[in-house]
Amino acid sequence: MDSLEDYFPTKAVKRAEARMASVLRAESDRLRNLGKLDVQKVRESLPQILQFTADYHAAFMGYLDAVLPQHKNPIKCGPGCGNCCHHYPMSIEPFEHIAFYATLRNREDLFSILEACVLRQEKFSGFAEAALSAEAPSEDPEEDALHEFFARGYTCPFLRDDGCCGVYDVRPVTCRMYFSQTDPCYCTPEFLQTEKNKSFIVYLPDYIEEAIAEISEYYEDLDLPEALYAGVVQMNALDGEIFV
Ligand code: SF4
């Protein structure tokens, strides 16, 4: 996977970073006054958490608009592809879990969504256990499990039949950061680490990542997982305490 971690600091990039930093600073200031969040505090400040998450996602999209033109080759991703939606989505921030679940909880198909999430969570746990207990475990068993999950082709339960994301507006940043400079037909397990596939990840600058991590620490008592599907299940368990 090819990535360009340091983008040239054009005015557009600086503006996008400043906007992201300002969104994060405002939330950080708000949380500093509240202290560590428990379910009651989450419930009481739900509108602010949802607004912050929407602002954070909008700021990330602004950052993409500023940095993607710096890649020499045009981005080949487009609506209806969905090839990257067979990964096991990780690195979800706790406030993203809350905002994501808030849009799901009243859906008529919530039960089947939960079933699909539990199934994928169990599959991934099985791959992780197998990787850990292998006779010669690799240096990164979690990475092995992620590869195995992708190789098995488990489609994200939110991917629609037309290949578009069914939760597009609230999809987490981890679903927004992957791009391909080659035909998306090569974003499949057999081509992923070959010359035919030039996919890459857009990373945020370290100081922005640190600010996000600082905000997420306020949620640590909720013990939300990093994985999207496990987060949906855990948020469902907290539903009655947070959403009243
Ligand atoms: S949430 Fe949407 S973008 Fe993310 S993996 Fe699922 S279908 Fe794809």
Image: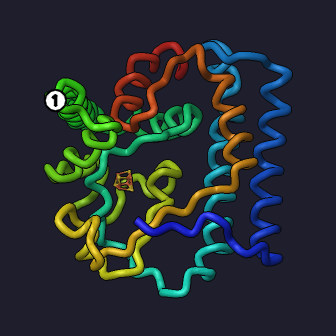
Give the side of residue 174 with respect to residue 49, left or right: left
Residue 104, image x, y percentages? 40, 38
Seen in the picture, residue 86 relative to 127 is either above or below; the reply is: below
Q: Determine the image quadrant of residue 44.
A: top right
Q: Secondary structure at mark 1?
A: loop
Residue 183, image x, y percentages? 30, 81
Q: How is the image coloured?
A: rainbow
Residue 121, image x, y percentages? 26, 31
Residue 165, image x, y percentages? 36, 59
**Residue at the outermost front position:** 136
- Callout 1, which amino acid? Ala
In the rendered view of the protein, which quadrant contains the C terminus? Answer: top right
Q: Examine the rendering and report whether any part of residue 96 can be seen.
A: yes
The structure residue drawn at horizontal position 62% and vertical position 20%, both measured from the top left corner, is: 43
Name the one closer to the observer, 240 or 188: 188
Give the side of residue 32 with respect to residue 181, left or right: right
The structure residue drawn at horizontal position 53% and vertical position 51%, both measured from the top left corner, is: 173
Q: Which residue is mark 1?
A: 134
Q: Determine the image quadrant of residue 199.
A: bottom left
Seen in the picture, residue 40 relative to 213 is either above or below; the reply is: above
